Image (spheres, rainbow, N blue to C red):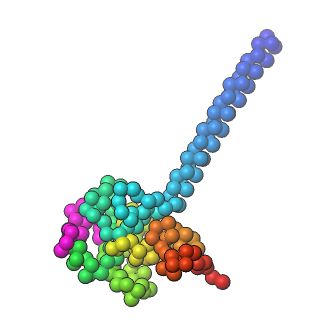
Amino acid sequence: MTETLIIIFKLNGGIIMKNTMRIMISFLMIMMFTFSLTAQEDSVVKITGFKNLYRYQNFFIAGQPPVEELEWLKSQGVRHIINLRTEEENREVKATAYDEQAWCDKLGFSYDVIPVNGLEGYTPENLEKFIAAINKNEKTLIHCRSGRRANDFFMAYLIEHDGYSVEEATAIGRQIRFVIPLEKILDMQFFLGKP
């Protein structure tokens, strides 16, 4: 009888050990998958098939989207669009391509227009409007004509609203459309942090 108990214990010990290893391996796989998802959420993804379309977390940053891009964004769960083009730029797109406001209404997007006219439009007041328009839990497209203003305001949002450092925000922005023209001319990057 003692021999049988020892054998059963050894067998059960082996089974327990196998189950423990399976649990540990499963746990490690879950942790790696979770880390992978977190890394994806915190990295910029270039969306293929569209010109100048990038994703960071719940935000898509782009130049002027064609109708097909709006339809694709809708299929990806985007519910809100922030347009940073000027009134003149919006009239031009409406006359030559399509009526963005009408398409946004048709597709069920909420739609905000914050006209940013060149450097004169880079104001704290426009940044406040931009921050007020964003719901962080809602997938949002932020766009202008080329994506540069959208990217600049997005970086400012990350700094002012989400507490990113200048270095962190510009590291994200550089993966999208951010560049200081002088950097391009000199083929170098400038340090933008505090001295």
Residue 92 percent coordinates (x, y): 22, 77
In the displayed structure image, the side of residue 118 where residue 7 appears, left or right:
right
The part of the chain drawn in magenta is 95-111
Q: Quadrant of the C terminus?
A: bottom right
- The relative height of residue 38 versus residue 5 in the rendered view (above or below) is below
Residue sitting at x 51%, y 55%: 40
130 left or right, relative to 74 = right
For this orientation, the residue located farthest to the left is 95
Q: Residue at x 57, y 71 (%)?
A: 168
Residue 122 picture quarter: bottom left
Q: Is residue 13 visible?
A: yes
* Magenta stretch encompasses residue 173: no
Quadrant showing the N terminus: top right
Residue pictured at 35% horizontal, 56% vertical: 49
**Residue 181 drawn above or below residue 22:** below
Asked whether the viewer can see residue 161, the reply is no
- Residue 102, percent from left and from top: 20, 68
Q: Residue at x 38, y 65 (%)?
A: 52
User: Which of the two residues, 149 or 6, is positioned nearer the viewer here?
Assistant: 149
